[in-house]
Image (cartoon, coloured by chain):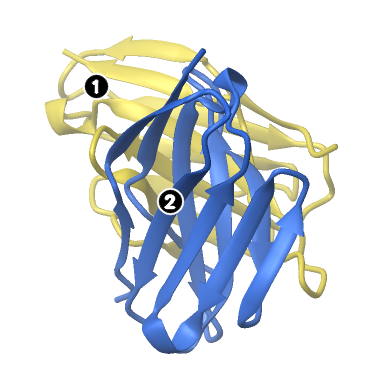
């Protein structure tokens, strides 16, 4: 079964500080995604990547950067953390194979609290 | 931009009941329709998906898709307390690799 891990699992950050969330997958999947989950908003896509060294903006990219240094690793960077970025962040991966590209395999999530 | 909405927001049913969850979408060109289940404090996990009109059954779960009505649903037969979770529907259009999720239906099955 797909394996996606995230670190840290929880973090408290100060407003204006820099936060880096990391994701690692061992599925050999080409696609990786970052979502945030807030009560009442479901899962919203922040950034995604099809291949190493390339990232794409999702539906809510403002205030976030992403980095994909290798096929296995995908990071989400908050350069200047704000109170509104308090949420649970999920990383996911999917296979590029026909019929499989859409199914998302999620990591355990990172609970971020910005004070 | 694709809009995906779910109803109801929450649902409480007794053990053994049939449960029905609904999802509507806005893009008629969508081609991936799925349900994910998320237990409290856990990651979402794909439950089942469908790509063409009709029904698909897997165990106690049935997904029904009507593209013309921009609607699909999940039916859970003989609901169990272990089915208590947040259910997220998900849709993807044919011209994108992005999946859009609904805001979820929180299901509670009472023993």
Which colour denotes chain B?
blue
Density class for disc 1 (Cα within 10 Å; few <14, some 14-19, many ≥20) is few
Which of the labelled discs sits on residue A64, or is there none?
none
Mark 1 to mark 2: distance in Å? 41 Å
Task: Please report the residue visible at 23 percent of the width from the left and 32 percent of the height from the top.
Answer: A85
Task: Please report the residue visible at 56 percent of the width from the left and 84 percent of the height from the top.
Answer: B94
* Secondary structure category for the residue under label 1: loop
* Residue for badge 1: A17
Mark 1 or 2: the one toward you = 2
Tell me whether circle 1 and circle 2 mark residues in contact (CB < 8 Å). Answer: no
Task: Please report the residue visible at 52 percent of the width from the left and 34 percent of the height from the top.
Answer: B17
Location of residue A49 in the rendering, given as x and y in whole percent from the top left corner: 58, 59
The answer to whether residue B25 of the structure is visible from this angle is yes
Which colour denotes chain A?
yellow
Q: Does residue A66 sit above or below A30 in this rendering?
A: above
Q: Quadrant of residue A88?
A: top left
* Secondary structure category for the residue under label 2: strand
B35 horizontally vs A71: left or right: left
The answer to whether residue A30 of the structure is visible from this angle is no
Which of the labelled discs sits on residue B21, or is there none?
2
Badge 2: chain ID: B
């Amino acid at each position: 079964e797909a394996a996606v891990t995230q670190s840290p699992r929880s973090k408290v950050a100060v407003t204006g500080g820099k936060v880096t969330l990391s994701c690692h997958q061992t599925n050999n999947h080409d696609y990786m995604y970052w979502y945030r989950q807030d009560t009442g908003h479901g899962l919203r896509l922040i950034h995604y990547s099809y291949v190493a060294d390339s990232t794409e903006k999702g539906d809510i990219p403002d205030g976030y950067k992403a980095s994909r240094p290798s096929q296995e690793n995908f990071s989400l960077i908050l350069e200047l953390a704000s109170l509104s970025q308090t949420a649970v962040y999920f990383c996911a991966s999917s296979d590029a194979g026909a019929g499989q590209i859409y199914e998302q395999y999620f990591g355990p999530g990172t609970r971020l609290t910005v004070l | 931009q694709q809009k995906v909405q779910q109803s109801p927001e929450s649902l409480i049913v007794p053990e053994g009941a049939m449960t029905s969850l609904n999802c509507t979408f806005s893009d008629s060109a969508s081609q991936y329709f799925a349900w994910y289940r998320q237990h409290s404090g856990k990651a979402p996990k794909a439950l089942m998906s469908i790509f063409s009109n009709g029904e698909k059954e897997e165990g106690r779960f049935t997904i029904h898709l009507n593209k013309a009505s921009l609607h699909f649903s999940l039916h859970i037969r003989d609901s169990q307390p272990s089915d208590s979770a947040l259910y997220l529907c998900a849709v993807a259009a044919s011209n994108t690799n992005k999946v859009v999720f609904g805001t979820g239906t929180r299901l509670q099955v009472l023993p």
